[in-house]
Image (tube, rainbow, N blue to C red):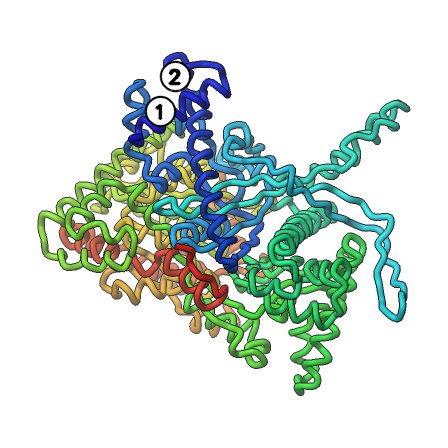
Amino acid sequence: MKKIEFLKTRLEDNLSKMFGVNIEDASVKQIYYASAATVNDELKHRRRIFNHKVKAEQARRVYYLSIEFLIGKSLKNNLYNLGFLDEFKTLLASINLTLDDLDAYEPDAGLGNGGLGRLGAEFLDSLASLEYPAMGFSIRYQYGLFKQRLIDGWQTEVPDLWLIGGRVWLTERNDKIFNVRFSGHIEEIDINGKKEYQHSGFQEVEAIPYDMMISGAGGKAISVLRLWKSQNIRDFDIASFSEGDYKKAMKDKFEANLISQVLYPADEHNEGKTLRLKQQYFLVSASIQNIVHSHIKYYKDIKLLPKYAAIHINDTHPTLAIPELMRILIDDYDLKWDEAWDVVTATFSYTNHTILAEALEVWSEELVKRLLPRIHIIIEQINNYFINKARQLGIHSQHLQNMAIINHNQIKMANLCVITSYKVNGVSALHSEIIKKSIFNDFYKLYPNKFTNVTNGITYRKWLAQSNPKLANLIKEKIGENYLLDAEYLKEFKNLINDDNVLKSINTIKQDNKNRFAEYLLKRNGIKINPETRFDVQVKRIHEYKRQLLNALKIVYLYTELEDNPKLDIQPQTFIFGGKAAGSYYIAKQVIELISSISSEIDKNHLIKEKLNVVFIEEYNVSVAERLIPASEVSQQISLAGKEASGTGNMKFMINGALTFGTLDGANVEIAQAVGDDNCFIFGMKTSEANALWKQGYRSNDFYDKSPRIRKVINRLNVGFNDKSFGHISKYLLGNYPVSDPYMCLADFDSYLDSHFRMDEIYKDQRKWAQMSLINISEAGIFSSDRSITEYAEDIWKLEAIK
């Protein structure tokens, strides 16, 4: 049966089963749901085939634990990976529909926020593409993070009702339910000379699994993302209800459901901290029980777990998986402590994603003891075991304070990960060196062979072949399609560096993408931009260290110059921002307000707007990125050197021909090495220089005093934009807040501005710009997530592909 006939038959069957209609009478919404079901049926069919091969070969599988997976939309991606995209478009055309018509009914899955979650999604795709056995675990958030709305420039959070159109991709697995316990009391008893721990008075919730199929290129292997929903075991207290105590009747159900309501609940209060800890333990307890249950079913001997399972901790959120596995091995399978420790330390690996203290989770020992009493005992035992061993090795007590898991009534998740895991990796060459020299230096001296690097990567087929088909077709026309299976073949594209027809095509494709994005933004957000201007883009989570503020300060300077001289000869440019600030992150929200106010002020001055425009895209997500990144010409990656672990947005922009404008931070270092300094715009301090300046005592006022350009910007902030003064931003930069300018925007400002003007001059030569773009495209293959996953599989997880 031909593909199109196969798809039509399946689609019609699903329309009949789900809605009782035929294809001619179905609404667009019904066709979306039936199409998703059709694709999902095929994914599950292929998953069964692949799973059978994995079991037959008794292959080791990786279990990837992450608090978030930023999946985006599934229909188009799965159609592409399964090889059905063109045929499905033809089928839709036969009933006068397009894929975009269906796309309007699919929300971005509310399962992630930023780079951490997107990386998890990229990795599951590449694991499937390379046919490695893999499973991801996370939480089925009812409302995701939040929907971002800007009201008078201020970010306001509203619920993300993504499940309305997204649940069609989820398969409930009532055969895989596990119970998770909180609170209660632990009694240590002696039975025939053996310590046992009895847990009583606990609260218990059910973890209901929902499976999402994640396809890879070629669609032969399918990864599974298992998402847990929390539910009260009793579900309903009928006795209290009968007595008229309706609040009590619903209390347990409400508290249980809270666990899987939202991603990253605000934790500036005790209730939020408790909910976050509950959420993290809920995720790992259900996942580890699931992993152990499957292992026993197929391989019987629990001591063989490391042979068949590699469990990976993605950042510190899933760290409690370590003591949870210890608990199961000791309490449920009767292993001795040393036996359980041998299993655990041969099973876990850990990726560190940041050196920022705020993201290296530390929990109150009192909270852990109260909420997770058995887990607290195990963490204490691991801590004591490590300290005793370290002392035997001659580790000085001063260093032990930094290395201990428990110190001053605080539990350090990162230390627990490093002590337990058999491998610890950073996510870029620079970052991996930094963690060895800074936060984990004492551990590195003790366990030098434990530390390694795996630079992040992207699923380039999604970000190039799917998102930028015209550019992908140009590359395929010139060098063939081998690059779709091996990104290293992109290097061959560099041979066309002096081909004028290719260079013109690159510029034409970029302009077409800009035109399309301008139309999309007008339709989606009601924002009108001029596609003839240069698109200069910074889209990422809003955070001080990512320095959206530095970009805004540069724009303020350009605006003041145009105020002084509206006829100033500068390159017409549109600065595009997007990203969310955490709901309680007040400073980040103020930066959004500043950018929005500058945008509103410019809208009032049409003469300036012809040369300078600023937009902040509300509710930036994966779907917007798929349209914006191919249209972008400048990729702003301007974090303070030493703060960004890697980044993956920089790689997506690079493979689409945008030029990196950034500091030597994270993967920017490797991008600059790959393309050469002449094909990107690097500015500002290096990591060593930033660290040295901070140690000697950074004073932002020194830079204010020396730079008339900075003084001009600060004065304009005090005046304000759109009838709002931003003197509070000035105080943040120059006052004590608690330290002025903590991410050194003013220290890098003049260098940043000088590089901007240098870029302006180069941009005037569009042939030269196209050559630089071509080199970036051709050197982007090294940043494929296929390469990242191959390194993980071979060097860390010890997986073998199932062909």
Q: Secondary structure at mark 2?
A: loop
Query: Dot 1: few (<14), some (14–19), or many (≥20) neighbours within 10 Å?
Result: some
Alpha-carbon span between mark 1 and mark 2: 9 Å
Q: Which residue is mark 2?
A: 23
Could you tell me which secondary element the residue under label 1 belongs to?
A: helix
* CB atoms of marks 1 and 2 within 8 Å: yes
Estimate the x, y position of residue 685 in percent, counting from the top left. 39, 67
Which residue is at a point 49% across and 43% down the rendered structure image?
A: 48
**Which quarter of the image is occupied by the C terminus?**
bottom left
Query: Is 438 drawn above or below residue 489 in the view shown?
Result: below
**What amino acid does circle 1 point to?**
Lys
Q: Position of residue 329 (x, y in %)?
A: 71, 62
Q: As shown in the figure, which amino acid type bears the numbered disc 2?
A: Ile
For the image, the number of numbered tags is: 2
Which quarter shows the N terminus?
top left
Residue assigned mark 1: 8
Q: From the viewer's perspective, is the residue at label 1 or at label 2 nearer?
A: 1
The disc placed on residue 535 is none
Disc 2 packing (10 Å; few <14; some 14–19; many ≥20): some
Where residue 14 sits: x, y (%)?
Answer: 46, 23
Q: Is residue 719 visible?
A: no
Please state if 693 lies on the left or on the right of 180 as rendered.
Answer: left
Q: Is residue 60 above or below residue 336?
A: above
